[in-house]
Image (cartoon, rainbow, N blue to C red):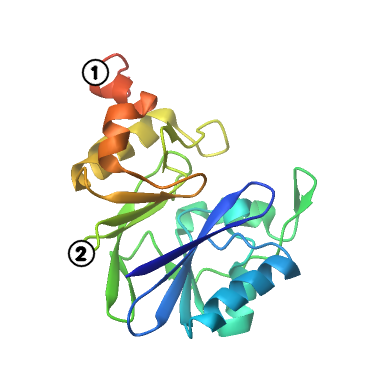
Amino acid sequence: MEIKRVVFNPFRENTYLVWDDTKECIVVDAGNMNEGENRILAEMISSRGLKPVMAVNTHGHFDHLGGAMWLKEEYGVAFACSSKDQFLIDSVSGGMVYGIKCNEVPAIDVDLDAVAEVKFGNSTLKVIKTPGHTPGHVVLFGQEDKVLFTGDTLFRESIGRTDLPGGDYSWIMKSIIEEILPLGDDVTIYPGHEDASTIGHESLYNPFVVEVLNNEINYKG
């Protein structure tokens, strides 16, 4: 599995182009918001001879959604996102957030709340539900390649915000402790913002995780 990151939009959002030897690819969290960013992503796709088959979103925040409609119109891809985040999509599609014009978002074709995996070419990513940053947040796990696309659930030495609509601290920590950490220390995480890390690094150096593991914080309470 090959992974290429590109950073888009004013929120410095990580968009991932993911493909295998068949040249079929998915775009995880397409944050491209304007014609210039569309051209960058199109060049990345064409220069590698890739065939996009799906735009996959870890969650429904607008900074991760800007390119979903463009991908659907340009390449005819399906749009995958959890229906539990539909209320977030509805609130931003075609509107304004923080003074930024949000692009229209397509209808959900693949409900990630109802499927166990995402497939492209010869590759499979397991869909793991990780509510907390948003109610419908998911992460995408490539077991064979030991890669995990964590969206805004887990960052390098930080976690996603829980003070936005639908956010919940106890749920995000439950997701991290019970769903992500057991995947293994050697799994590389590709977050929605900032740099990559590993689960092992986060278990040792992420202050939000460490304080729970050391029983300094009772996330269940």
Query: Label 1, on which residue?
Result: 214
Callout 1 environment at 10 Å: few (<14), some (14 to 19), or many (20+)?
few
- Residue 220's quadrant in the figure? top left
Q: Which mark is residue 162?
A: none
Q: Residue at x 51, y 79 (%)?
A: 77
Front residue of 71/207: it is 207
Which dot, 1 or 2, sits closer to the camera?
Answer: 2
Q: Name the kind of residue labelled 1 in the image.
A: Asn
Q: Position of residue 14 (x, y in %)?
A: 53, 54
Callout 2 environment at 10 Å: few (<14), some (14 to 19), or many (20+)?
few
The answer, for residue 55, to whether it is visible in the render is yes
**Compared with residue 79, is residue 31 higher up or lower down, i.e. above or below?**
above
- The quadrant of the image that shows the N terminus is bottom left
Q: Which secondary structure lies at badge 2? A: loop
Query: Label 2, on which residue?
Result: 144
Q: Position of residue 56 (x, y in %)?
A: 46, 65
Q: Position of residue 52 (x, y in %)?
A: 48, 80
Q: Name the kind of residue labelled 2 in the image.
A: Glu
Q: Residue at x 39, y 43 (%)?
A: 131
Q: Please identify the residue farthest to the top as the structure is shown.
A: 216
> Is 8 on the left or on the right of 45, as rendered?
right
- Residue 113's quadrant in the figure? bottom left
